[in-house]
Image (spheres, rainbow, N blue to C red):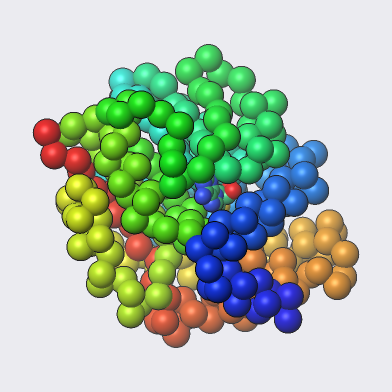
Amino acid sequence: MVAKLFRNLVDFSPKLSLRLWQLFYEFIARRFKKLTNWKYMNYGFADTQGKVTDDFNLLSENLYHHLLGKAQLAGKNMLEVGCGRGGGCELMLAYQPKTITGLDFSENVISFCKQTYQQPNLNFVAGNAESLPFDDNSFDIIVNLESSHCYGNRGNFFKEVTRTLKPGGFFLYADFMGRVHYPKRPAQLTECGLQVITEQDITPNVLQAMELSAPYKEAMIKKIVLKPFRKPINDFVGVPGSNIYNKFNSGETIYFSMLCGKGE
Ligand SMILES: C[S@@+](CC[C@H](N)C(=O)[O-])C[C@H]1O[C@@H](n2cnc3c(N)ncnc32)[C@H](O)[C@@H]1O
């Protein structure tokens, strides 16, 4: 019931949606600030053909590797919008970019990141995806993974991506959305000044990751979440039987990944 009420309120107005997601993520970051080995908040990606793992962190890392593999990152200035607990930014270091900036609207999650990762070319900033606190043409690469479904107005975010990307820069984008709305997405990106170079439906990989990681997530939730809150948290983390799992499974919602570019 709590999860359903949350979903209904989020759909009610863009401003309310932004505020509710912010309160939700602030609460999660404050409540679990001591869990330093919990670094990712995405549903993960399983290689449906190849190696199978049930390690929750590895599955989440796979999703980053899937997305990051779409462009050349060495020597680049990178921004991740909606960096969450910062695991993705830390993992990007292995691709040898020049700098990485992680941005999130949750102040608590940003202080968690600042305390947890202290590499010289990695920094974290609090801010809103819909009004990025950076100059025009600041980044070569912008990454956005499983965050844009929380935004009040995704068009505002895409315009900000175009503004802050350098000419010739790339936008690596993955998230989920309703299948009926999905066909409109490439046109929306183009209207905001970005060209879609490749796009992929990765719902089967995400579904498999949700199934593989379920025992780990359920055991963890039993350990750290009070009984009355377990159902909404199970829904949030996407265990089989949750609302989001059922939507992916029925094809109502798809999980996509895209490589977009800003022309020279
Ligand atoms: C599902 S988590 C994904 C985090 C990270 N990308 C990962 O995969 O671990 C979504 C993140 O987006 C952030 N977020 C949501 N709306 C935002 C906004 N308008 N501006 C900046 N960050 C936002 C949330 O605070 C949260 O940390």
The structure residue drawn at horizontal position 68% and vertical position 31%, both measured from the top left corner, is: 111
- Asked if residue 12 lies left or right of residue 206, the reply is right
Q: Is residue 137 left or right of residue 227?
A: left
Position above or below: 60 against 252: above
State whether residue 3 appears in this view.
yes
Residue 189 vs 4, above or below: the answer is above
**Figure quadrant of residue 258:** bottom left
Considering every residue shown, the one lying at the far bottom of the view is 250
Q: Residue 198 sits in which quadrant?
A: bottom left
Question: Where's residue 29, x and y in %?
Answer: 72, 45
Q: Is residue 83 visible?
A: no
**Above/below status of 73 relative to 7:** above
Q: Relative to 180, is 210 on the left or the right?
A: right
Q: As rendered, which of 209 and 89 lies closer to the eye? A: 89
Q: Point out the image quarter for the C terminus.
A: top left
Q: Residue at coordinates 62% horizontally, 56% vertically from top-left?
A: 19
Q: Is residue 194 left or right of residue 130?
A: left
Q: Residue at x 32, y 34 (%)?
A: 164
Total numbered circles: 0
* Residue 88 rendering spot, x and y as whole percentages: 51, 39
Q: Farthest top residue?
A: 120
Considering depth in this image, is 85 or 72 the residue closer to the camera? 85
Above or below for 119 versus 133: above
Q: Residue at x 40, y 75 (%)?
A: 178
Quadrant in which the N terminus appears: bottom right
As drawn, the residue found furthest toward the left would be: 264
Residue 124: x and y in percent read 55, 28
